Image (cartoon, rainbow, N blue to C red):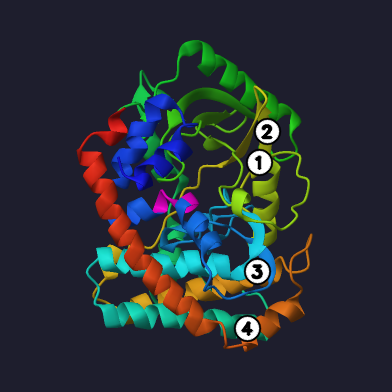
């Protein structure tokens, strides 16, 4: 067994035993899913590297890559395109966030057979657009009225979609009753005793939390599989029914919160959070322009969880569908760079983060840009090599035991 596989198995040993194999299966699908499932390896390697540019300290989502930007309906019921995964969020050097994202361009575009010159141009575009946005010192947001090109079309479709669409995907009709579906691979049955305790817990949250919806009754719960890196953590989906509006339902996601996988490698003093769920939602509220609906934290059997409404639309741009549309890819990468800089500006000066003036100065400094590009290009090649080693061990059954 290769040392790489030993590192992977050691990190994933804490996950639900019956789910670990599903994570390894997902990571074997392609090099980008492997990259998404190995955030901890990325930062372990980065922290040991010598040729990496210094940068200001700021709040980062921690696992920024092409599919961790997406559309969602926020508390104000408007649709936004923004960063949307904060499980690994932490106070860290800003260049760490950039490196994770830019490397994802090299890895994902290679998996899509996008030519190297175009990939290099997109990585440079992200760096330069990010720096230019920082240098202005003003955070911006992207919604249907302000979006351009494919992102505008993406958000317009999201704004027009109905909540019934996601409800139909996640539920079935049985004897004229709406119930959570168990027919797909992403929703699994929960043992009855645990299911009843979970339903009671969420009902208590509805009745006591100011972040919860009013006048709803919990009608069902299933185990939920989603993402790549988070496969194996405890995650549940709840069906809520309105008690005063006929045929009105909500779907609520409740996801276990674990320490950031960056924490062993970050030497910067962090705030003393009440829990990891508190860390996640606090950073999310700081970095996003408007937070997702029903965003809240809870403790279940002594373990922290993040609760939020399962979004009618919370989807990533499908680069596979636009791989030959240079202008569309250009616009998307540019928007992602603007949003990254805006999230950091929005949270600037909070609990040890660099001030807006410090971030502006970093944006105006070009000395770090080529060094960062070179690091990400080289590390992208390392990811591809590591993936081949992973596939070899995976096919040889190393991860079956």
Quadrant of residue 168 in the image?
top left
Mark 4 or 2 closer to N-term? 2
| Element assignment for label 1 | helix
Q: Assign the magenta stretch its main secondary structure.
A: helix
Where residue 343 appears, as percent x and y from the top left, is 63, 67
- Pick whichever of labels 4 and 3 is earlier in the sequence: 3
Residue 120 to residue 307: above or below: below
Earlier sequence position, callout 1 versus callout 4: 1
Q: What residue is rendered at 74% in x and 34% in y?
A: 209
Task: Look at mark 3 in the image and give the residue it sits on.
Answer: 344
Q: Residue at x 48, y 12 (%)?
A: 192
Label 2, on which residue?
A: 298
Residue 363 is labelled as 4
Which residue appears at 33% of the width and 32% of the height? 21
- Name the residue tied to disc 1: 277
Quadrant in which the N terminus is drawn: top left
Q: CA distance from mark 2 to mark 1?
A: 7 Å
Decide if residue 365 is on the left or right side of residue 101. right
Callout 2: helix, strand or loop? strand
Q: Secondary structure at mark 3?
A: helix
Residue at mark 1 to residue at mark 3: CA–CA distance = 20 Å
In this rendering, the label closer to the viewer, 4 or 2:
4
How many residues crowd mark 4 within 10 Å: few (<14), some (14–19), many (20+)?
many
- Which quadrant would residue 211 be assigned to in this image? top right
């Amino acid at each position: 067994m290769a040392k790489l596989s030993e590192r992977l198995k050691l990190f994933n040993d804490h996950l639900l035993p019956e789910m670990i194999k599903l994570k390894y299966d997902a990571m074997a699908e392609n090099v980008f899913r492997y990259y998404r499932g190995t955030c901890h390896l990325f930062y372990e390697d980065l922290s040991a590297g010598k040729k990496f540019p210094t940068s200001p300290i700021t709040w980062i989502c921690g696992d920024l890559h092409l599919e961790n930007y997406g559309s969602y309906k926020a508390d104000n019921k408007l649709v936004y395109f923004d960063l949307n995964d904060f499980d690994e969020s932490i106070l860290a050097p800003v260049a760490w966030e950039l490196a994770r994202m830019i490397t994802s361009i090299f890895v994902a575009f290679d998996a899509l057979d996008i030519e190297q010159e175009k990939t290099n141009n997109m990585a440079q575009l992200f760096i330069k657009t990010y720096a230019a946005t920082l240098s202005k010192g003003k955070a911006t947001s992207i919604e249907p009225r302000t979006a351009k090109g494919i992102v505008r079309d993406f958000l317009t479709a999201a704004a027009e979609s109905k909540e019934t669409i996601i409800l139909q995907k996640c539920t079935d009709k049985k004897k004229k009753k709406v119930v959570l579906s168990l027919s797909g691979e992403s929703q699994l049955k929960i043992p009855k005793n645990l299911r009843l305790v979970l339903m009671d817990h969420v009902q208590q949250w509805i009745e006591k939390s100011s972040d919860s919806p009013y006048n709803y009754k919990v009608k069902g719960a299933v185990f939920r599989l989603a993402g790549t890196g988070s496969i194996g953590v405890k995650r549940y989906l709840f069906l809520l029914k309105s008690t005063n509006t006929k045929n009105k339902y909500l779907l609520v996601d409740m996801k276990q919160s674990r320490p950031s996988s960056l924490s062993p490698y970050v030497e910067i003093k962090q705030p003393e959070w009440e829990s990891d769920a508190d860390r996640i939602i606090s950073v999310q509220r700081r970095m996003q322009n408007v937070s997702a609906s029903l965003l809240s934290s809870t403790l279940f059997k002594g373990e922290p969880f993040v609760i939020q409404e399962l979004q009618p639309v919370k989807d990533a741009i499908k680069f596979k569908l636009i791989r030959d549309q240079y202008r569309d890819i250009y616009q998307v990468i540019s928007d992602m760079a603007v949003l990254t800089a805006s999230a950091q500006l929005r949270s600037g000066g909070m609990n040890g983060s660099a001030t807006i003036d410090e971030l502006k100065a970093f944006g105006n400094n070009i000395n770090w840009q080529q060094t960062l590009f070179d690091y990400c290009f080289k590390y992208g090649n390392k990811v591809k090599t590591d993936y081949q080693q992973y596939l070899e061990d995976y096919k040889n059954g190393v991860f079956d035991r």
